Amino acid sequence: MALAALALGLSACAGPRWQTVYQYEPPAGPQAQACTQRCIDHQQTCRVSCEDRHQQCLVSAEINARDSYELSRHHYARQMQAWQIEYALYESDWRRYEHQRERLEHDQRHYGKRCKDDPKDRTACELAERAKRELRSLSSHRPYPPSRPYTPSLSDEIAEAQSRCTRDCGCIETYNACYASCGGRVMPQQRCIDNCPDGVPRFEPVTQ
């Protein structure tokens, strides 16, 4: 009995990965061999055609990605101009924030010491408490730098575009239907190919 692979069935990242393989029981009869040979021929034609379409898709995807990359570069240049203005404003806000924080910390230390040395000095105690409250309030208004625009990458653009090109043309499903129509039996089985549970042997992946 022969084995062939269909596709990968993936679970969670940490869980086992499975692949469906097929076990074939040949049909009986004088015309069975000719029938199954036609299935094999059709499958081979399907695979060649599928690979041709895949290669054409890769070429087309790269061309489109290069065009998209040029647009991304112009958009990135405009984003960088806006980011530089925002960052300059952030630096100004940060200097003002730091100046206020240092002044309040100084007041808290200075008046806190006076209040500790003389608890009856109500003015010093009130000023120390005020500085403490204003420090807490100031910390919730801390300025944060603007996010720098993502730098476009031609290789990333091409990889993303080409990732949508598939080699799955349904050739194995067509073959299985053809084989069954010849009178043969097609029996799917699940085999673990990675992160296998205890007691489950690891199966080497089979490519179409």
Image (cartoon, helix red, strand yellow):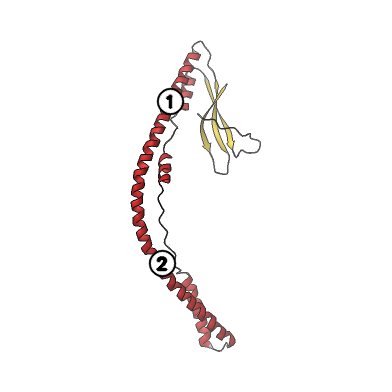
- Asked whether disc 1 touches disc 2, contact meaning CB atoms under 8 Å apart, the reply is no
- Give residue 208's position: percent from left, percent from top: 50, 28
Relative to 121, residue 84 above or below: above
Tell me how many marks there are: 2
Residue 62 placed where, x, y %? Answer: 38, 40
SS type, badge 2: helix
Q: CA distance from mark 1 to mark 2?
A: 59 Å
Which sits in the foreground, 24 or 52?
52
Q: Residue furthest top?
A: 30
- Labels 1, 2: front one: 2
Q: Earlier in the sequence, mark 1 or mark 2?
A: 1
Residue under numbered circle 1: 46
Left or right: residue 96 compared with residue 196 = left
Q: Is residue 47 above or below residue 162?
A: above
Q: Is residue 17 left or right of residue 154?
A: right
Residue 116 versus residue 82 in the image, above or below? below
Q: Say what secondary structure mark 1 lies in.
A: helix
Q: Amino acid at mark 2?
A: Tyr
Q: Which amino acid does the dot numbered 1 rest on?
A: Cys
| Residue topped by disc 2 | 90
Which residue, as the protein is rendered here, is positioned at the far right?
A: 199
78 with respect to 37 (left or right): left
Q: Residue at x 33, y 56 (%)?
A: 78
Residue 72 vs residue 192, the one in the foreground: 72
Q: State the quadrant of the N terminus.
A: top right
Which residue lies at the image location 49% right of the left edge and 76% below the top edge? 102
